[in-house]
Image (tube, coloured by chain):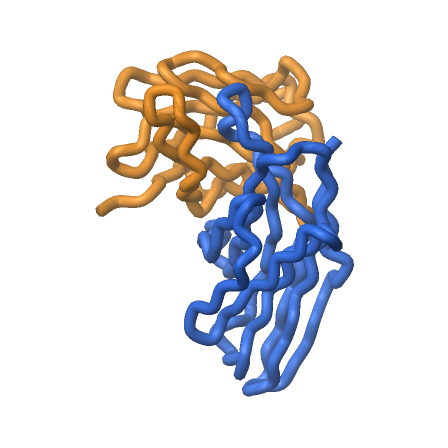
Amino acid sequence: AQKVTQAQTEISVVEKEDVTLDCVYETRDTTYYLFWYKQPPSGELVFLIRRNSFDEQNEISGRYSWNFQKSTSSFNFTITASQVVDSAVYFCALIRHGSSNTGKLIFGQGTTLQVKP
Amino acid sequence: DAGVTQSPTHLIKTRGQQVTLRCSPKSGHDTVSWYQQALGQGPQFIFQYYEEEERQRGNFPDRFSGHQFPNYSSELNVNALLLGDSALYLCASSLFRGGTPNYGYTFGSGTRLTVV
């Protein structure tokens, strides 16, 4: 069975602080993809990053960075110098690779991030 | 470039009624997936449609059914509504490249369904 755990339900920081959102996953598959999505109050899930299981390189995109460690089954997300516009619910998700599984994303419970001015 | 469009945005129904939600995929996408997101929870996969057929299904009862049209748009139907069906229903589109899964999903803003 596959599972994604986001242990932090809510995080509150003051603007310009750095914040890390944790994601731990479980899967028996060797090939899989991991995702992070942002969900603002409007409801749509905004894609942030996709990483396959063979690519453990950390990635940085502006103020965002991701740390993928297969040894600990973690895919953590850090926002540097947080801004009020970063306030949203963030979801980590997992999908097993395979022609028979093209749509079933497994999501964590989400972490609500509140950035105060 | 239009993204995923869902309608209606909000809906209130009574227990036992039936509801139909609609989704138009992003231009160039041919696959539509539906998710249910209860308040405070992560989205749960309902099913996915490709080439007008249900390709994959999550753990949802038969009261949940769908359809995909030749223009790739899709409908989600829920019969005999229960209070527990109250949720945000999200549609995601993607491109299934002739057998090679493409994991680039674009989500719509969802339909907020309230069952009273």
**Quadrant of the frame with the N terminus of chain A:** top right
Given residues B67 and B51, the one toward you in this image is B51
Residue at image x 75%, y 54%?
A: A72
Residue at image x 68%, y 76%?
A: A12
Given residues B54 and A71, the one toward you in this image is A71
Given residues B16 and A98, the one toward you in this image is A98
Q: In which quadrant of the rendered view does residue A87 lie? A: bottom right
Residue B36 visible to an observer of this rendering:
no
Residue B26 spot, x, y in % from top left: 31, 38
Shown in orange, the chain is B
Above or below A12: residue B69: above
Residue A100 spot, x, y in % from top left: 53, 19
Above or below B66: residue B6: below
Residue at image x 63%, y 24%?
A: B58
Give the total of numbered labels. Answer: 0
Residue B116 spot, x, y in % from top left: 67, 35
Q: In which quadrant of the rendered view does residue B60 lie? A: top right
**Quadrant of the frame with the C terminus of chain A:** bottom right
Residue A95 spot, x, y in % from top left: 58, 37
Above or below A112: residue A29: above
Residue at image x 50%, y 80%?
A: A83
Q: Outermost residue, left direction?
A: B1
Shown in blue, the chain is A
Residue B21 visible to an observer of this rendering:
yes
